[in-house]
Amino acid sequence: MGQQVYNYRCYFCHGYSGNAKTLASSYLTPPPVDFTALTPQELSVYAMRQAILNGKTDTAMMSFKFLLSSEEVEAVIYFVREAFMANKMLNTKYHTEENGWFEHQRYAIAYPFVSGEIPLDTAWEDLTEQQRKGKQLYLNACVSCHDRAKVNNEGVIWEGFPLSWPRNAYDHKKDNPIDALSQASPYHIHDIEVLYTPASEAEKKGQKIFKDNCTFCHANDGSGKNWIGQFIEPHPRDFTRVSIQNNYTKQSLKNSIQFGVKNTAMPAWRYVLTEQEIDDVIAYMWQKFK
């Protein structure tokens, strides 16, 4: 009974093996408890019972008082203490013969990605042919359970994104786009007119060019967090995140605008804007997002 309760209620955070090597551990602070690292002497039955019934303050551990019967609470405590903390039982571990996994060695090419020996976000071209097969096997089969792979870049923990382009008649250039969802969504705030007074004539011209052409993807505030920008993958560059003067050169910006950016939705503008117009929009961006 305890194992059944655990596998239904507890595995998502603490893992089927009780070692908390789960996706949840990557974004919960503090992380879930690793029961295999503890002994029965280090964690009392009373403390476990209180945590299950009342939850734990300042953690993701919730109260199960109204979800589990008294019998189920005691059963899951007994299971965790016996299986994970005291006996380190083999039948709770992944892919052992005791747990019904025979000849698991035939999947060995995927092991480096499960163990973290090779980061999962390693570029395909940087892998050998066998490693590419191992990565494909991991992504097709292993990841459904082994979802806590090692990566070089964790990325954002949580990010909302729109499921579609805005409806017909949407116009990002208007202060109030004709779309009720736009005005009610978290994306609309990024398309509201940004108050900024250009200091030069070039900036003034660049401001209008940016609004007429660039804000469709980069948003009026330059964050790329408007509806269109968040729908595009990868997202348009967020010029508000870092200082543009400290992280770019005018020439690098000019190259991106003129020739586009490979593997993104950023198109080449050299046949749409004149060189002077490109210089003007850079002059505006250079000061607005400095």
Image: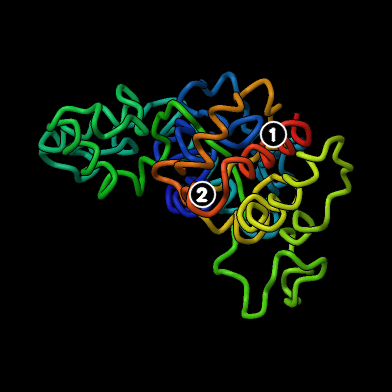
User: Which class describes the residues within 10 Å of circle 2: few (<14), some (14-19), or many (20+)?
Assistant: some
Q: How many marks?
A: 2
Asked if 250 appears above or below 16 in the picture, the reply is above
Asked if 245 appears above or below 214 in the picture, the reply is above
The three-letter amino acid code for the residue at tag 2 is: Trp
**Mark 1 or mark 2, earlier in chain:** 1
Residue under label 1, please give it.
Answer: 241
Residue 157: % across, % down: 58, 41
Would residue 258 be seen by someone viewing this image from the given angle?
A: yes
Residue 52: % across, % down: 65, 44
Residue under label 2, please give it.
Answer: 269
Asked if 142 appears above or below 20 in the picture, the reply is below
- Rendered image quadrant of residue 58: top right
Q: Nearer the viewer, residue 235 or 50?
A: 235
Q: CA distance from mark 1 to mark 2?
A: 24 Å
Q: Is 161 placed left or right of 117 in the picture?
A: right
Nearer to us: label 1 or label 2: 2
What residue do we see at 19% from left, 35% from top?
A: 132
